[in-house]
Image (cartoon, rainbow, N blue to C red):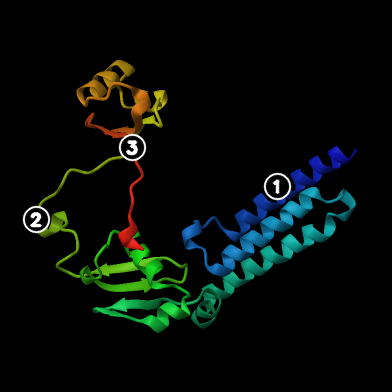
């Protein structure tokens, strides 16, 4: 009887979560504000409690989930209507770096130390602050970086040309295993793959950490590296 109750309450919890998720919207994690993130965790915790509670005691967590979801939906409507309240609930963009100056008070207010700031710059592809004009901290916690005009990547329009469009590549080997469906999608077979690996002096497939193939049949191979790469100068 207890097992049956657990199954029923779990199903109720899953169905409720699916419905509430659809009602609240399917935004990506990177688009969530801090409140949205915490609210989502709270609803998930209540859903777990609902799944493990007695069937007769499932009303309270069920109602609590509905209340949290209703507040989330209400705030979304309010944020859409009012810019001021949107800034109150979601926060606003903060300038962390601009024109060669680091704003330490803004970093302190955002609870970001200098190492984390530099790390986020590197994640975005910038290893030297002298190549950056402005760094913004968005309300969702992500960095937006504006490079100096003479440091930004050159695009086709700058050169008056129309480059060939890049396309997705297929992962044909992952962690030493051939992904047969992906390889079939490229129109090639295992013999072709093995021949290509031999041409790149790769004798054993198990030595390959990742291999990709594009529509032009260009195979890129990344072998497993036995040594750890140290980066002590970055911390």
Determine whether, in the image, residue 149 is placed left or right of residue 12.
left
Residue 33 % position (x, y):
52, 67
Residue drawn at (60%, 60%) of the image? 24
Res 75 seen here:
yes
Q: Quadrant of the N terminus?
A: top right
Task: Tell me the residue that label 1 is attached to.
Answer: 14
Mark 1: which secondary structure? Answer: helix
| Of 10 and 100, the residue lying toward us | 100
Determine whether, in the image, residue 15 is placed left or right of residue 213.
right
Q: Is residue 145 above or below residue 162?
A: below
Q: Is residue 63 above or below residue 6?
A: below
| Of 144 and 206, the residue lying toward us | 206
The Cα atoms of the two marked residues, 1 and 2, are separated by: 54 Å
Q: Residue furthest left?
A: 160
| Of 184 and 96, the residue lying toward us | 96
Residue 110 % position (x, y):
46, 76
The Cα atoms of the two marked residues, 2 and 3, are separated by: 41 Å
Q: Earlier in the sequence, mark 3 or mark 1?
A: 1
The 10 Å Cα crowd at callout 3, few under 14, some 14 to 19, many 20 or more, is few
The label nearer to you, 2 versus 3, is 3
Task: Tell me the residue that label 3 is attached to.
Answer: 225
Mark 3: which secondary structure? Answer: loop
Residue 98 % position (x, y):
28, 78
Res 124 seen here:
no
The 10 Å Cα crowd at callout 1, few under 14, some 14 to 19, many 20 or more, is some
Mark 2: which secondary structure? Answer: loop
Q: Earlier in the sequence, mark 2 or mark 3?
A: 2
The 10 Å Cα crowd at callout 2, few under 14, some 14 to 19, many 20 or more, is few
| Of 135 and 59, the residue lying toward us | 135
Q: Quadrant of the C terminus?
A: bottom left
Residue drawn at (85%, 42%) of the image? 5
In the image, which disc is placed on residue 160? 2
């Amino acid at each position: 009887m207890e097992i049956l109750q657990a199954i029923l309450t779990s199903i109720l919890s899953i169905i409720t979560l699916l419905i509430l998720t659809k009602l609240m919207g399917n935004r990506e994690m990177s688009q969530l504000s801090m409140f949205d993130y915490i609210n989502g965790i709270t609803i998930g915790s209540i859903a777990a409690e609902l799944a493990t509670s007695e069937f007769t005691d499932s009303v309270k967590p069920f109602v609590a989930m509905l209340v949290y979801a209703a507040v989330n939906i209400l705030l979304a409507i309010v944020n859409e209507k009012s810019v001021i309240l949107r800034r109150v609930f979601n926060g606003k963009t903060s300038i962390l770096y601009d024109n060669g100056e680091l704003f330490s008070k803004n970093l302190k207010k955002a609870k970001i130390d200098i190492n984390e700031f530099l790390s986020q710059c590197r994640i975005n592809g910038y290893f030297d602050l002298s190549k950056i004009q402005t760094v913004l901290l968005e309300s969702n916690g992500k960095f937006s970086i504006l490079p100096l005009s003479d440091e930004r990547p050159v695009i086709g329009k700058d050169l008056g040309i129309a480059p060939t469009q890049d396309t997705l590549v297929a992962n044909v080997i992952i962690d030493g295993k051939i992904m047969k469906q992906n390889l079939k999608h490229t129109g090639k077979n295992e013999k072709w793959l093995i021949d290509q690996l031999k041409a790149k002096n790769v004798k054993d497939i198990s030595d390959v950490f990742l291999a990709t193939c594009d529509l032009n049949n260009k195979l890129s191979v990344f072998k497993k590296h036995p040594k750890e790469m140290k980066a002590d100068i970055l911390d």
